[in-house]
Amino acid sequence: MAFADTLPSSSAAAAPTTGIAPSLDAFWMPFTPNRKFKQSPRLIVGGEGLHYDLADGRRVLDAIAGLWCVNAGHRNPRISAAMKAQIDVLDYASNFQIGHPAAFELAQRLARFAPEGMNHVFFTNSGSESVDTALKIALAYHRARGDAGRYRLIGRERAYHGVGFGGISVGGIGRQRSTFGPLLNGVDHLPHTHDLVRNAFSRGEPEHGIDKADALEALLALHDASTVAAVIVEPVAGSTGVLPPPRGYLKRLREICDRHGVLLIFDEVITGFGRLGANFAADLFGVTPDIITAAKGLTNGAVPMGAVLMRDAIHDAFMQGSVGAIELSHGYTYSGHPLACAAAMATLDAYTEDGLIAQAAALSPFFEDAIHGLRGLPGVIDIRNTGLLGGIELQAWADGPGTHAQAVAQQCVELGVLVRSVGDTIALSPPLTIGREHIEQIVDALRTAIAQTARPTD
Ligand code: PLP
C-alpha cells in the first residue's frame, strides 16, 4: 500500500492524545503548524518541470519553485542524469585533508560564475550553514589580520538568514529569535526598508529609502566603527515578503562599509542563480559585496548544498600563516559532497548553456506587468518585484497576521497553482523555465482567489 493510502480520511482512527493519525505523528515538520496540517495533510508525490503532482491526483503549477530553489524546473533531465552518473562512481568522499576532483572543479566554475574578484568558495549544506559560515569567516578574517577588536555584526530588521544561531542573531524576525532566548552578543540591526507610504506599487527598486542606508553610519558611530566586523543583508529580502532594495541603497551600504573597513555580506540564498535575471543580485545591482552566501538554486534543490563565495583578499588573509596549519577551523562532513557537486555543475550548465538566466531576464518585464495587473483588487495594498521574484501584499485581517495571505494561498491550490504566503504577502518565485501562458495562469488564479476570499473590510 502506498503511504498516501494510509493518510487519515475523516473517519480514520486518530491517535488519542493529539488527534493526529499515527502514520503522520513521527515527523515533526519544520516551520509548520503540525497539528493543524496533520488534520488535513496535503502531500506532494511527484514533480516534473513546472508542476507538482499531489497525493489526491491533482497537478498544480509550482509558482514558488519548491521553496525558492527549483530554478531549472523539477527533475531537470541534465541534473538527474548527472546525479545518477555520479552515484555510480563515487558516493562519498571527505574533503578533510583529502579530496575529490568534483569539489575543486565546482569551486572553480562558481568562481567564474560569481562577480569579478570572488574567486574562492567554502562549501556548506544549506543556506543557514552558509550564513553562519560567512559570519564566522568575517570574524576570523579580522582576527587573521590582527584586528580582533572587530567583533560586532549588523543585520537588519525583518531579515531572514536561516536558522543557525548566527543567522537568527543577525536576522530580524521576532518570533524566530524570542523563541530561543539570548542569542549572539554584539549584534545590532539596521531598519528594514519596507515603506508602504512612499513606495507602494513600485516596480523594481523603489524610489524612496536610500536614506535607510544612512542608519548604518549611525550604528557605526554608536558602537565605534572599529568594533564592527560585518554587515549582512539580503539584496532583495525574500521570506519577509519580497522587499527590493530602494534605489541606490546597496551602493550606499557599500560606500559606508568601505569607509570604515567593515565587510559587506550579501545573503543571496534566494537571489542567486538567476532568480533576478542575473547570476547574482550583486551583478544586477552593480554592487559587489565581500562575501556572498548561496544555497537553494545552487543545486536546483535536487540535493542539499550551500556555498560561501568571497573576495580574494579575504581568502588570502588566511593563507599567511605557517604552511601545514589548518587555516580555518571550520567545516562540515558533507562540505563539497560528490553528489551535490555533480548536481551543482549540471545546474550551472542548465543556467548557462540552456540560457535559463537570460530567459528569466527576458521574461521579467512580462512578469512585472502581469502581477501589477492585480493592483486595485480588494485588499491588495502593495505589489513588488525584481526579476522573477514577486510579492503581493494583502491587507491584514483582524483575526491575525498572515491569515489573509494564507486563505488566498489555500484557495490558489484549489485553483491549481501553488504559491507561498509569507506574513501578509503572497510570494511568487516560479522556475526560470516558466512561459508567458503559465504566468497568466498564476495571475488568473490569484485574481480569482483574491476575489473569492475577499471580505467586506478588504
Ligand atoms: N538565507 C536566506 C536569505 C534564505 O531565504 C534562507 C531560506 O529561505 C536561508 C538563508 C536559509 O536557508 P536554508 O533553509 O537552506 O538553511
Image (tube, helix red, strand yellow):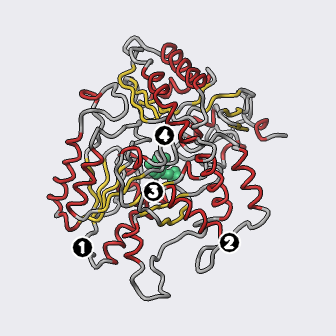
Instruction: Please state which of the two labelled residues, at mark 4 or mark 3, is closer to the viewer.
Output: 4
Question: What is the distance, in whole Å, between disc 1 and disc 4 at their CAs?
Answer: 39 Å
Residue flagged by tag 2: what amino acid is it? Ala
Return the residue at label 4. Answer: 277
Q: Is mark 1 within 8 Å of ligand 1?
A: no
- What mark, if any, has residue 293 been given in the picture? 3
Q: Nearer the viewer, residue 276 or 24?
A: 276
Question: What is the distance, in whole Å, between disc 3 and disc 2 at their CAs?
Answer: 24 Å
Q: Are marks 4 and 2 in contact (CB under 8 Å)?
A: no
Quadrant hosting residue 345: bottom right
- In the rendered image, residue 344, in percent from the top left (x then y), is placed at 62, 55
Residue flagged by tag 3: what amino acid is it? Thr
Q: Is residue 116 left or right of residue 350?
A: left
* Residue drawn where x is 46% and y is 36% of the image: 387
* Residue drawn where x is 24% and y is 34% of the image: 208
Return the residue at label 2. Answer: 93
Residue flagged by tag 1: what amino acid is it? Gly
- Mark 2 surroundings within 10 Å by alpha-carbon count, few (fewer than 14), some (14 through 19), many (20 or more): some
Q: Is mark 3 within 8 Å of ligand 1?
A: yes
Return the residue at label 1. Answer: 149
Q: In what element is the residue under mark 1?
A: loop
